[in-house]
Image (cartoon, rainbow, N blue to C red):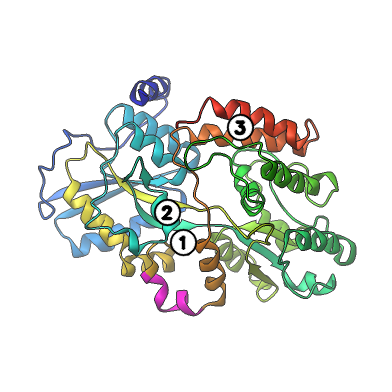
Amino acid sequence: MNRRATTAAIAVSLASALTLTACGGSGGDSVAADAKQTLTVWAMGTEGEKLADVAKAYEKANANITVKVTPIGWDVAHQKLVAAAAANKLPDVMQMGGSYLTEFADMGALEPVDTKAFQEKDFFPAGWQQGEYDGKAYGVPWYVDTRVLYYRTDLAKKAGIEKAPATMTELRQDAEQFQKKAGTKYGLSIQPNGLDSVQSFYQFLYSAGGEIVTQDGKAVANSPAAVKALENYTGYFKKGIAAKSVRPGYDVTKDFNNGSVPMFFGGPWHMGLLDDNYPDLKGKWAIANVPADKTSASMAGGSSLAVSADSEHKAAAKKFVTYLTDAKGQADWYQRTKDLPANMDAWTSGELATDPNMKVWKKQMESAKVSPAQPKWSEITSKIDAAIEKAAQGKASPKAALDEAQSAIESLVQK
């Protein structure tokens, strides 16, 4: 498959709108790690903003290296990477989301990882697997991500709920109890529409034993398990237990704070948002593992660090990636961002080893499910986003919506 040609076509239409700051090169290893040089790095979202501080600390210890960090918004990250790859102008080091890396590895834009320097055994399996494609590793895990259940303990007490729901049946019952006895507007916040609704659905899908595409490349989006999961998921909208539509950029923590939403599935960054923005909520919320259906399973997310195949600074890039992904660097990064460390040794001391909340995250991460390595994964999941919205709005039954998604996905899957 000629992914470079496809990417180039996309990039042509984007080129006039994008301003790229990157280094291109011949792809040689001509510059030694200790030579004076500038390393270009792209990182996304909050990580892009925080990484600049780490880069300054790194420069102090490595006077020969200037690290130029360019923060990129997640909303434009994919477009910028596509355009830069097509022009052979990717930065030396780049943050790669799990859904992106396969695409760029497939087009030959990434340097394979030196698996003697970076070893699989040091990282969460799900973190390492997200950096693999076609039997090779192209990304070193930087941080990992999954989802757990956040719930208001004070409102649970009002509703007569004594502990977190352990099963999907209990989750539905508790959501109804919050509405009836604690007077909340909704019982649970899950995403009914919009980009990446699938990330909200994964907890139901994986716990029911469903998948979208198997690891060996078979589309199974309309399997009985997947249909059951979407029936359960959309049942919350049908019964008014969850909001039937949400605006783009909806911040669930505001409604969690005011009590209109007592439960939601969230990532680790939500802990920091709640602590920072709503200090009065302290002691009134907790987290728990995803309630079990056939099992308790959540999505595996996070990011890897990849090196451009065209970089002329591969030795220095490798050294910088080592700094960011060893146990010490990971523990430091957690303190700065609350991103969950991908390196398992970082969890053996300090807050990561003693905080009860961290035990919940670690347990969920150990069973988190990785998306299959599919170059068109973003396009594939967009079909599930559409199916979720149709079923949530009552425009199609869960089975009909997933049948339609299955038909579209079959032509996108690479076997």
Q: Earlier in the sequence, mark 3 or mark 2?
A: 2
Residue in the image at 63% along x and 60% along y: 296
Q: Amino acid at mark 3?
A: Lys
- Indicate the amino acid at tag 1: Asp
Q: Nearer the viewer, residue 67 or 299?
A: 299
Q: Secondary structure at mark 3?
A: helix
Task: Give the CA distance from mark 3 to mark 1.
Answer: 29 Å
Secondary structure under the numbered disc 1 in the rendered image: loop
The x and y percentages for residue 127 are 42, 55
| Residue 385 image position (x, y, % from top left) | 63, 37
Would you say residue 253 is visible in this rendering? no
Q: 33 left or right of 10? A: left
Query: Disc 2 marks which residue?
Result: 47
Magenta span contains residue 333: no
Q: Which residues are magenta?
A: 345-354
Identify the residue position indicated by label 3 in the image. Answer: 383
* The N terminus lies in quadrant: top left
- The residue where tag 1 is placed is 339
Looking at the magenta stretch, what is its main secondary structure? helix
Residue 267, how many percent across, how many down?
Answer: 57, 58
Q: Residue flagged by tag 2: what amino acid is it?
A: Glu
Under circle 2, the secondary element is helix
Residue placed at 33% from the left, 31% from the top?
107
Dot 2 surroundings within 10 Å: few (below 14), some, or many (20 or more)?
some
Where 198 sits versus 155, above or below? above
| Labelled pair 1, 2 in contact (Cβ < 8 Å) | yes
